[in-house]
Amino acid sequence: MMKRQAFLRSETRYLEAVETMPRAQLLVLQEQRLLKMLSYAYERAPLVRRLWNASGITPADIGSRADFIARAPFLTKEDIRRQRDEEKDAHAGLLCLDPSEVNWLVSTTGTTGEPTILSHHWGNTGLDQQAPGLNGQWPPSYAGSSPRDYWEMGVREGDYFLNFGFRIRGSTFRPAQYLGAIPIFLSYAPGDLLLAMKLSLQYRPTMWWVMTPPTVRALLALERDHKIDMHDVFSSYKAVIFAGEPLGPQMRTHLERWGVGDRIFNMSALGDIALAQDCRAHDGCHAWEDVALVELIDPETGAVIEKDGRGELVVTTLVNNADALIRFRTGDYVDMKWGTCACGRTHARFQPLGRTGDEILIGDRSVLPIDVWLLIEQQPECADGIFQMIRPQREMQYLHIRVGYAGQSNLADLQARLTTSIQAALGLPVNIELVPQERILATGGHLKFSRTVKE
Amino acid sequence: MAATNTKPWAVGLLRSGPEAPYVIPLGEEELDRDAQWAMRQFERMGIQPGKPALLIGSGGDYHLLWPCEDALTRMKVPFGQAEVLAADAARSAMFLRRLQLQAVLGITLDILDALPMHGLDVSRLFANMPVICAAPGAWEKLRSLGCAPWQEIRLGPLYGFQPPDEEGYLYNQDEWLLEENEGRLLVTNRRPRMFDFKRMNFGITGRLIEVDGEKRVLLT
Ligand SMILES: [Zn+2]
């Protein structure tokens, strides 16, 4: 079982020195880990070897981080799917260990298709990287950098941690226990929310893991039907981790009304390599660059974008000895910032904007669901932000948006209001299709529905 | 109700019994003993190191699931995780389709009924599954398909496992005292736990039987 750590008594701002390591030094550390990882993965992972051989290079040709960025081939979801199906290999040619050595077979949410298996191994035997913060007690890669995020959010020894999450990516309460926090086990199910309220008042937890849009909607119903004082319920929370989708402005107003507006921390997957979470500066989810080499590219041309801005997130694991995601194109469209954060950390951070497959081009204008989100939520009947962009192909003549409404409404009037507001804001033609919001919600799973659909 | 003043390792919830839900603090040592017992049951089921298994369960049941996860890890069994509801059946289906699983543990009727929608031939799939441990409902369905699954039930705060084609649920007798009382089974912890169960009635109607010198629970 887990040993209590010496740092638990300290009150330093940062959990690990690497968080604020000068950028130049961080890149040297990254390069050392990268070069070791490349030869390790090339030797062991058939898909990596196949892609690299097809590009005519081997790890011996890569002497630096710059070489890697200039020459290494990308790994796409399509490459993974093809290898998995054609070779009948559940691990899609990425596994660097014998299958018998794997500890945890976790999986992606599966919102955009069949969930993908991700493998983890306790410790990182064979690769021998210094995994961040951890001691071989759990997968160093996926959850390994979460304790530093939780520490930043204020989780301390003896705190209670409300574990209201999906059981698909390992035992997600373990990073909190690493800090000495005590998880309260609940199921991610609406039926457990009343219990979550009760236990919040009884145990006064400091972290809610995790809040999602369907959960906020369910809490609003409980507040209304049971007259619960949400301000009291949330008064002890130092952090409410928000995941699944970007937090829309309307939903944020509810959380602000409950008194936790300034304690919402967004969480995003760092391309299936790790989790990335906001710091107290709330300027994007920190992509820990000692865990992953993070790149931003133009999704169309594949050109590397070195300055701040929008693009596709590309990640390379530096510590996972089980699954070799090397230069993996995540398909996640993000807004990236590279400079030192206001929190003092030197690692990149990003805002998730959507999927690269969500982007619609009208002429040379790029539009993502997030660009119309606020405009839709501003209409009272659409305050829940339930909508889908209809995207039969990337290039469109006009925006076609299916918008869900709640309750009774004058539909002609609502349609006119939405059309006027979106056309005025974006300067683009728009076709609004109104449906009861339940119809859109019913198309999704328990975590989220697709924000873009073909028809 | 905590037996000691030490901080718990986690806090779980029991959802059955007259005053349910019970909020139960969990200690590290008791969970360790639970994991050791789970290991012995998994070995008895025939689960072997190095071959993948699927452990289906929900986060709210971690007071029972963590010892199982811990046991599989100690046994060096790679395992996948999936939720119990039909809404998450795609995940179980994916593990079942992609991996040569040696065991499916905790399968529910919800998941079983949803698997055909994800393109799986349930009869064929489970006919070749070396170890199945099913929740009530799924167990009957799998039996009707000709499989011989183990069955898992909750006896309040503990698991009971019934071997295929045998009568009675095995339980951790070192840890728990079960007593018959007017057709009900009362639950007491024999060893210190952070939450003391003293002849607690979880509404389990049954009696105790002995099979090969081993106590088992027979539901009536
Ligand atoms: Zn920061």
Image (cartoon, coloured by chain):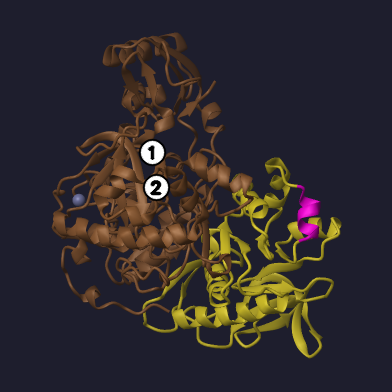
Chain colours: A brown, B yellow
Which element carries disc 1, helix, strand or loop? Answer: strand
- The answer to whether mark 1 and mark 2 are in CB contact below 8 A is yes
Q: Position of residue B185 (x, y in %)?
A: 70, 77
Label 1 is placed on what type of residue? Answer: Asp
Which element carries disc 2, helix, strand or loop? Answer: loop
Q: Position of residue B157 (x, y in %)?
A: 59, 73
| Crowding at mark 1 (Cα within 10 Å: few <14, some 14-19, many 20+) | many
Q: CA distance from mark 1 to mark 2?
A: 8 Å
Residue that numbered label 2 is attached to: A271
Residue that numbered label 1 is attached to: A332
Residue shown at 44% from the left, 30% from the top: A357
Q: Work out whether disc 1 and disc 2 sit on a shared chain.
A: yes
- Residue at the farthest bottom position: B213
The quarter of the rendered structure image containing the C terminus of chain A is top right
Q: Position of residue A354 (x, y in %)?
A: 38, 34
Q: Is residue A224 visible?
A: no
Label 2 is placed on what type of residue? Answer: Gly
Residue shown at 42% from the left, 17% from the top: A395
Q: Chain of mark 2?
A: A
